[in-house]
Image (tube, rainbow, N blue to C red):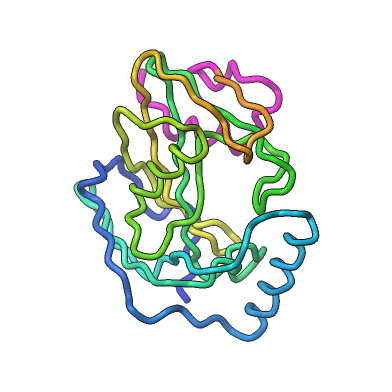
């Protein structure tokens, strides 16, 4: 498994310039990782989470330049993304959301969720499903979590986390006057100011850093 860490590639790219292909054979984790994934799933069940194991995507390889991002993806057991280490390059899509006037959509994630439980997050996010294009994941998650569709969408970055999870990060702009309706994964939401330095105290440092990276030049 490749050791991907930090910012792996930076766009922005139009979704049409993000190419994704799939390997046929699923990724096989080691015995220790498989056992740890079993434990993680059992813990989710104990917390009352409806999350269940299945298949999702991992990043097998990639290539990037200023014009195009090319991804080679592979089916992987979903539960591996729950591991604090050795998460098998499991791929998650994060779609930050901006109102037409530049404000950022933030939601506090419910306590039963598998990741970032009880914490504030930007926009929508989730695992990339097998045979799904990551940009389509962003649009799907935006619809499922907030019942809204973007007016335009860019794929901004590919980032590797120390756990071994890979994040593909996008930015969606909503049409003027669009309203959102949160799903059960959020127990509170807010529109934070366009300038991150004006955000409230619950906007913790990683969110501010991410927004600073993605904010368009003034």
Q: Quadrant of residue 14?
A: top left
Taking the spot 70% from the left edge, 45% from the top edge, the residue there is 117
Residue 25 drawn above or below residue 193 = below
Q: Nearer the viewer, residue 110 or 23?
A: 110
Q: Quadrant of the C terminus?
A: top left
Taking the spot 72% from the left edge, 48% from the top edge, the residue there is 112
Q: Nearer the viewer, residue 43 or 181?
A: 181
Residue 174 drawn above or below residue 81 = above
Left/right placement of residue 55 relative to residue 70 reads: right
In the image, farthest residue toward the bottom: 31
Callout count: 0
Q: Where in the figure is residue 217, as x and y percent of width and height?
A: 35, 23
Q: Quadrant of residue 176?
A: top left
Left/right placement of residue 113 relative to residue 26 reads: right
Q: Where in the figure is residue 32, as x and y percent of width and height?
A: 67, 82
Q: Nearer the viewer, residue 101 or 86?
A: 101
Q: Where in the figure is residue 94, as x and y percent of width and height?
A: 47, 44
Q: Where in the figure is residue 33, as x and y percent of width and height?
A: 64, 78
Q: Which residues are magenta?
A: 193-218
- Magenta-span inclusion, residue 215: yes
Taking the spot 44% from the left edge, 66% from the top edge, the residue there is 58
Taking the spot 49% from the left edge, 56% from the top edge, the residue there is 127
- Magenta-span inclusion, residue 196: yes
């Amino acid at each position: 498994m490749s050791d991907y860490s930090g910012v792996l590639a930076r766009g922005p790219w139009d979704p049409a310039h993000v190419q994704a292909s799939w390997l046929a054979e699923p990724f096989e984790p080691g015995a220790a990782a498989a056992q740890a994934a079993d434990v993680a799933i059992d813990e989710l069940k104990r917390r009352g989470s409806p999350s269940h194991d299945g298949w999702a995507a991992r990043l097998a390889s990639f290539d990037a330049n200023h014009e195009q991002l090319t991804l080679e993806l592979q089916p992987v057991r979903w539960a591996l993304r729950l591991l604090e280490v050795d998460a098998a390059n499991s791929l998650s899509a994060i779609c930050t959301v901006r109102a037409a006037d530049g404000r950022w959509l933030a939601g506090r994630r419910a306590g039963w969720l598998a990741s970032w439980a009880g914490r504030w997050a930007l926009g929508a996010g989730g695992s990339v499903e097998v045979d799904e294009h990551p940009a389509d994941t962003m649009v799907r998650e935006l619809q499922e979590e907030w019942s809204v569709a973007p007016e335009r969408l860019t794929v901004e970055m590919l980032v590797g986390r120390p756990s071994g999870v890979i994040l593909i990060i996008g930015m969606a702009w909503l049409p003027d006057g669009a309203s959102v309706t949160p799903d059960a994964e959020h127990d509170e939401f807010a529109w934070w100011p366009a300038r991150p330095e004006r955000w409230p105290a619950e906007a913790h440092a990683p969110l501010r850093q991410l927004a600073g990276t993605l904010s368009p030049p003034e």
